[in-house]
Image: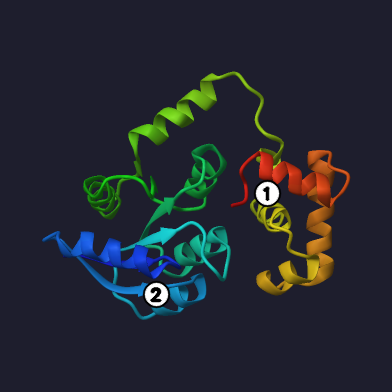
């Protein structure tokens, strides 16, 4: 029996996922979480095989959450569910330790297929996502400016793009304001941006924020 943890900040989505799993003989949802901190706390004591993880939840950024899961519970596989453009997130999250990446609009049958694949030790990227990534690589277009950022710089870029202040970001990431300012400066320099207005415009244009 495959034991799953469901992590999504929308109760309706969690209920829907649990219903899909309940209709499957070889899977069971043992618990659920509405934010990253709750997920990490519950995982410490949970006996589960995989986590179905929403890409945007309150609490720790998905990259930090993913890295902590792989650090403290390396055997637990993580399937990312997302509504974001594939090219912005899939590769970065797979490199960070995700075993699979699936669009939230996927059919229940594909969700079940993905879960079985990652728990079996494989990787799962749906056909439409694989085609999108292949088209990006074959397009010959230059990589976007944010592709050169480190994971932390990318994280700060996305948070700044939502209009969060240096202080708010520092509090959310449990870092000093000086450290966040340094990351902001690096982002600006690497991407050739002059101010927050240009940064926010870039983030919105490239669909890095919701």
**Residue 151 in view of the camera:** yes
Label 2, label 1: how far apart the Cα atoms are: 27 Å
Residue nearest the observer in this picture, 207 or 63: 207
Question: Label 2 belongs to which residue?
Answer: 43
In-front residue for pair 55/77: 55
Q: Residue at x 80, y 41 (%)?
A: 190
Residue positioned most to the right: 194
Q: Is residue 150 above or below residue 169?
A: above
> Is disc 2 placed on a helix, strand or loop?
helix
Q: Earlier in the sequence, mark 2 or mark 1?
A: 2
Q: Quadrant of residue 44?
A: bottom left
Q: Left or right of 89: which side holds 116?
A: left
Residue 184 as seen in the image, left or right of residue 206: right
Residue 73 horizontal/vertical position (percent): 41, 68
User: Which residue occupies 65% across, 39% down?
Assistant: 206
Q: Judge from the rendering whether residue 165 lies leftward or rightward of residue 147; answer left or right.
A: right
Q: Above or below — where is 31 with respect to 100?
A: below
């Amino acid at each position: 029996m495959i034991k799953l943890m469901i992590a999504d900040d929308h109760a309706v989505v969690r209920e829907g996922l649990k219903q899909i799993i309940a209709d499957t003989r070889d899977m069971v949802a043992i618990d659920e979480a509405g934010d990253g901190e709750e997920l990490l706390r519950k995982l410490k004591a949970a006996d589960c095989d995989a986590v179905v993880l929403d890409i945007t939840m309150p609490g720790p950024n998905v990259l930090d959450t993913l890295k902590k899961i792989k650090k403290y519970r390396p055997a637990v596989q993580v399937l990312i569910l997302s509504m974001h453009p594939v090219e912005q997130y899939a590769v970065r999250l797979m490199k960070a330790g995700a075993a699979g990446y699936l669009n939230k609009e996927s059919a229940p049958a594909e969700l079940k297929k993905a879960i079985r694949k990652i728990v079996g030790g494989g990787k799962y990227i749906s056909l439409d996502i694989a085609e999108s990534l292949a088209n990006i690589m074959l397009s010959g277009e230059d990589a976007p400016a944010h592709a050169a950022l480190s994971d932390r710089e990318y994280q700060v870029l996305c948070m700044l793009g939502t209009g969060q202040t240096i202080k708010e970001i520092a509090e959310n990431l449990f870092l000093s304001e000086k450290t966040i300012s340094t990351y902001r400066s690096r982002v600006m320099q690497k991407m050739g941006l002059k101010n927050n207005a240009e940064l926010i415009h870039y983030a919105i244009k490239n669909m890095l924020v919701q």
